[in-house]
Image (spheres, grey):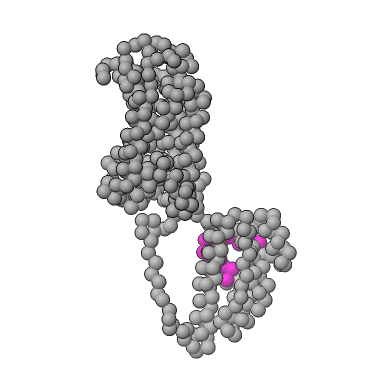
């Protein structure tokens, strides 16, 4: 391998990137736009759920229950309704997602027995939102009824029965606030790096074919290996710069806690960059159209990374055959590494499993990329 020839190819490819508006847009604008859209647009947190209230009693006790829903931060009281038909109309029109129905005997039942029946109605069109919202509602109601029962017992000179009670002390490690942002945004870095890296390198060899410069490249004394390295080195540096930008935004803008090692993060990011850049280069060698290569690169990177890497959907909740397929998705290992480094502060020893998977992918892809290009016109 000749260093002078390698530098010449790398310099030539750098000029190509600087003169190509499409490559500049992919390298500079795509990370910024995707970081903003995915960082702010993707969230599993359910807050301020629109809730209509049908308070048949309209007493101080019933209003206190309604205020508990609003004060929880999970619900937002939108309208006060006056009939069952109004509930149906409000949910059908999307005015509210759920409704709270407080019976006319609510205070009387609480005063006489310390308990009462309350009805909640939710729109099940969005099953995920509904499941979470119903869980929130049960929590608010259980807390309210416990408080009412305690006050009722004290008002009657009784003590609430404490026999058989369990004092549950709940602790959550690594993401104490249970914020989905801390879980999702590190995975956004993998999505952006996969898309940008493969998109950029999918244009390298195919650009030579479309512009008619392949004959000149083949006639030079550079070897196929020097061509590969010379064309990938500029994009490798671009990928690291994009990754650094996204990681800094993740830490300082979105305030995702970072508890791991910068060295581990840089090393694993470099391995992942080798994988995605190699995939793009392979497509560029096999497909002589820039448009065709870039489209297939987008499909092979975005779909597996968003659907099967654990970025959007938990892998352990997938069916067994699909879980088996995820082992063939390179982004699965990098997403797992990112979350472990950020939230758990994992070391290289802790990341042995996903790190081994990423090393295997990087080795295989690098080998296939090295043997893919041949200095022939056929």
Front residue of this view, candidates 224 and 347: 224
Q: Position of residue 246 (x, y in %)?
A: 40, 39
Whether residue 165 is visible, yes or no, is yes
Whether residue 21 is visible, yes or no, is no
- Eyeballing the image, is 207 above or below 302? above
Q: Residue at x 41, y 27 (%)?
A: 282
Q: Position of residue 193 (x, y in %)?
A: 41, 36
- Eyeballing the image, is 33 above or below 179? above
Front residue of this view, candidates 264 and 213: 213
Q: Give residue 67's quadrant in the image.
A: bottom right
- Apparent side of residue 187 relative to residue 367 in the rendered image (left or right): right
Q: Residue at x 31, y 43 (%)?
A: 356
- Apparent side of residue 18 relative to residue 105 in the rendered image (left or right): left
- Eyeballing the image, is 240 above or below 320? above
Q: Residue at x 72, y 67 (%)?
A: 83
- Eyeballing the image, is 65 above or below 96? below
- Apparent side of residue 18 relative to residue 68 in the rendered image (left or right): left
- Apparent side of residue 328 relative to residue 81 in the rendered image (left or right): left
Front residue of this view, candidates 236 and 366: 366
Q: How many marks?
A: 0
Q: Which residues are magenta?
A: 65-79
Q: Is residue 70 magenta?
A: yes
Q: Residue at x 60, y 78 (%)?
A: 116
Screen quadrant of the C terminus: top left
Q: Position of residue 336 (x, y in %)?
A: 38, 47
Q: Position of residue 340 (x, y in %)?
A: 35, 49
Screen quadrant of the N terminus: top left
């Amino acid at each position: 391998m000749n260093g002078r020839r390698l530098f010449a190819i790398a310099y030539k490819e750098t000029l190509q990137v600087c003169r190509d508006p499409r490559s500049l847009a992919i390298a500079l604008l795509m990370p910024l736009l995707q970081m903003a859209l995915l960082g702010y647009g993707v969230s599993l947190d359910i807050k301020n759920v629109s809730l209509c209230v049908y308070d048949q009693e309209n007493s101080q006790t019933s209003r206190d229950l309604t205020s508990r829903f609003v004060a929880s931060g999970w619900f937002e009281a939108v309208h006060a309704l006056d009939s069952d038909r109004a509930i149906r109309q409000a949910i059908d029109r999307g005015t509210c997602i759920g409704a709270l129905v407080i019976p006319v005997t609510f205070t009387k039942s609480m005063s006489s027995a310390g308990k009462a029946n309350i009805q909640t109605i939710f729109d099940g069109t969005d099953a995920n939102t509904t499941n979470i919202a119903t869980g929130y509602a049960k929590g608010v109601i259980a807390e309210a009824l416990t408080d009412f029962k305690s006050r009722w017992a004290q008002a009657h000179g009784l003590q609430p029965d404490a026999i058989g009670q369990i004092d549950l002390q709940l602790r959550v490690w690594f993401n104490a606030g249970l914020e989905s942002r801390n879980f999702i945004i590190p995975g956004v870095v993998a999505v952006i790096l996969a898309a940008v890296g493969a998109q950029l390198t999918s244009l390298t060899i195919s650009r030579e074919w479309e512009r008619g410069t392949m004959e000149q490249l083949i006639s030079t004394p550079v070897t196929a290996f020097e061509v590969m390295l010379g064309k990938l080195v500029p994009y490798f540096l671009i990928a690291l710069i994009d990754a650094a930008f996204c990681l800094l935004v993740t830490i300082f803008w979105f305030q995702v806690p970072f508890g791991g090692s910068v060295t581990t993060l840089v090393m694993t990011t470099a391995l992942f960059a080798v994988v995605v850049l190699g995939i793009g280069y392979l497509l560029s060698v096999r497909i002589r159209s820039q448009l065709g290569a870039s489209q297939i690169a987008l499909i092979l990177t975005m779909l597996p990374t968003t659907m099967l890497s654990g970025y959007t959907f938990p892998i352990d909740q997938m069916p067994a055959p699909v879980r088996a397929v995820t082992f063939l998705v390179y982004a699965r290992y990098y997403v797992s590494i990112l979350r472990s480094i950020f939230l758990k502060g994992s070391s290289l020893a802790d990341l042995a499993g996903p790190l081994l998977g990423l090393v295997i992918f990087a080795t295989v892809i690098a080998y296939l990329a090295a043997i893919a290009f041949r200095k022939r016109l056929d």
